[in-house]
């Protein structure tokens, strides 16, 4: 990279979250003339209030909920177990703090190149910190992340309104809670709270949960969630009244009283007062610029955009990829277009939920072959009393290339990875049926789904598949 002495730095990175730190790693391979600006708190959204503490809570909740199956296994005494919520939350915080400490340690060697303060962009090469210090750079990387969005009318609840930024800081949780919003994170937290023994009422303005589009997969998730909580779908909840004793929430003709509310109503890009209008670009109704998804460049400027500040791919692995792309292009003479990975989103409920590759579309023609499996009778799932959920696969009807999948299934997070890898390799259904399947494993359910799709693929392979890939007709073998 050619140095430009007129600038204070080669690159200024705004934001020290997952995307900003990935950009930092990429930039450091090429130049030491950089600075990382962050207003705090440090530790990344994932480690501090997102992926890791939520999964810690889910692990405790899933473990405790398994007690309901002990009798069926012949294990007695489950009624004596109870969830010590304060102890559960204490472990969540302790492990969370360990993850955060590891993140913070990664920037300890930056010295004066780590700048604490709120950045505001003045032009494509100039950033002001806390309204005082001005810094210039050849390139900017914007990786300011996101923050919880809470509709204004609910903010009147004060401390009884929780978000994922405050949920894990509670010393204890009340016996009755409402969850507003059943996107991926709301679905996870609603189930975690319910599985810990809290009386949960969950509200969602749509009929589909966790970003699912396939009606069969969504129905399986709704059935699973309904077994442990009250669901109110298809209508937006309203705050009817509240006093020191209870909060009254309604949706249509339904009304309930709770002690606290968890707002999982989505996150918004953290762009307030960032100065995006000073870049000279057209901004949409959300105040966001158009971003090239392959270079992450804004217009023709030497300004790059990465991470959860991009609401279309607000996932950790995407944030890290985008930080790498943005950082690499920020130090390059000319931005390079990078290939993006197969779309993969997982919700860690039980059974787990995932969307992989091309999402389901109700308007698909017969160009797409669809098949699936219901895990109710799948051998390994029945053995573990995990036999609920469905997997649906979508393939090109002419040739059988796997295009996408949605699932609500046991071991779904692992099945999702296998499917994402297969899509990335442009595998056909017939290719996958030639792969080895051990017995008895959950993956045999995937094989059943593959067979179902293959029956709808119009163009057969030149060489017929081996007979040992055919359906066995015995549940115990599939």
Image (cartoon, rainbow, N blue to C red):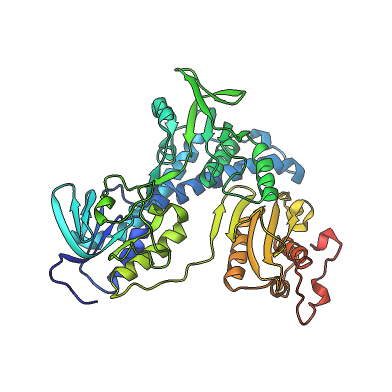
Q: Is residue 49 left or right of residue 113?
A: right
Q: Which residue shows up at 77% across the image and 51% down it?
A: 376
Q: Which residue shows up at 63% across the image and 41% down it?
A: 65
Whether residue 456 is visible here, answered yes or no, is yes
Residue 144 percent coordinates (x, y): 33, 52
Q: In this view, does 82 lie above or below 102?
A: above
Q: In this view, does 397 lie to the left or right of 352?
A: right
For residue 428, what is the image quadrant?
A: bottom right
Q: In which quadrant of the rendered image does the N terminus lie?
A: bottom left
Q: In this view, does 237 lie to the left or right of 376?
A: left
Residue that protrudes farthest toward the bottom in the picture: 463
Q: In this view, does 229 lie to the left or right of 105?
A: right
Residue 279 percent coordinates (x, y): 26, 56
Pick the front one: 234 or 224: 234
Q: In this view, does 350 lie above or below 412?
A: above
Residue 334 percent coordinates (x, y): 31, 74
Q: Is residue 226 above or below residue 145?
A: above
Q: Which residue shows up at 14% across the image and 52% down it?
A: 133
Residue 455 percent coordinates (x, y): 79, 66
For residue 67, what is the image quadrant?
A: top right
Pick the front one: 196 or 274: 274
Whether residue 173 is visible here, answered yes or no, is no
Q: In which quadrant of the rendered image does the C terminus lie?
A: bottom right
């Amino acid at each position: 990279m050619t140095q430009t002495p007129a600038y204070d730095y080669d690159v200024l990175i705004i934001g020290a979250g997952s995307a900003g730190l990935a950009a930092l790693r990429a930039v450091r391979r090429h130049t030491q003339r950089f600075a990382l600006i962050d207003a705090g708190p440090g530790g990344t959204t994932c480690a501090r209030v997102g992926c890791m503490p939520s999964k810690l809570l889910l692990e405790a909740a899933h473990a405790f909920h398994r007690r309901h199956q002990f009798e069926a296994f012949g294990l007695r005494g489950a009624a004596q177990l109870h969830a010590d919520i304060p102890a559960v939350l204490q472990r969540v915080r302790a492990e969370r703090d360990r993850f955060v400490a590891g993140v913070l340690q990664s920037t300890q060697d930056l010295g004066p190149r780590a700048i604490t303060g709120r950045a505001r962009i003045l032009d494509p090469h100039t950033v002001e910190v806390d309204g005082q210090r001005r810094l210039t750079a050849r390139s900017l990387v914007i990786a300011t992340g996101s923050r919880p969005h809470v509709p204004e009318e609910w903010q009147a609840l004060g401390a009884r309104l929780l978000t994922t930024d405050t949920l894990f800081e509670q010393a204890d949780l009340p016996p009755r809670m409402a969850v507003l919003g059943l996107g991926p994170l709301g679905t996870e937290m609603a189930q975690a709270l319910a599985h810990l023994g809290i009386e949960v009422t969950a509200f969602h303005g749509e009929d589909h949960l966790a970003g699912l589009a396939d009606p069969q997969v969504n129905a399986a998730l709704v059935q699973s969630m309904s077994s442990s909580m009250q669901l109110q779908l298809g209508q937006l909840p309203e705050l009817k009244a509240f006093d020191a004793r209870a909060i009254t929430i309604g949706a249509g003709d339904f009304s309930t009283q709770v002690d606290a509310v968890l707002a999982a109503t989505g996150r918004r890009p953290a762009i307030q007062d960032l100065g995006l209008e000073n870049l000279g670009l057209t901004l949409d109704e959300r105040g966001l610029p158009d971003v090239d998804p392959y270079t992450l460049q804004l217009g023709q400027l030497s300004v790059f955009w990465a991470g959860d500040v991009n609401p279309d791919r607000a996932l950790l692995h995407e944030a890290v990829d985008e930080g790498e792309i943005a950082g690499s292009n920020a130090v390059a003479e000319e931005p390079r277009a990078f290939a993006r990975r197969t779309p993969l989103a997982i919700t860690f409920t039980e059974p787990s939920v995932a969307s992989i590759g091309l999402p389901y579309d109700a308007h698909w023609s017969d160009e797409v072959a669809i098949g699936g499996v219901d895990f109710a009778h799948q051998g390994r799932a029945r053995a573990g009393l995990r036999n609920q959920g469905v997997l649906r696969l979508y393939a090109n009807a002419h040739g059988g290339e796997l295009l996408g999948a949605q699932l609500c299934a046991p071991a779904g997070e692992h099945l999702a990875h296998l499917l994402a890898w297969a899509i990335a390799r442009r595998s056909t259904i017939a290719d996958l049926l030639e792969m080895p399947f051990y017995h008895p494993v959950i993956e045999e359910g995937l094989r059943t789904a593959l067979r179902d799709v293959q029956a709808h693929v119009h163009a057969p392979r030149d060489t017929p598949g081996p007979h040992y890939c055919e359906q066995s007709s015995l549940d115990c073998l599939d």
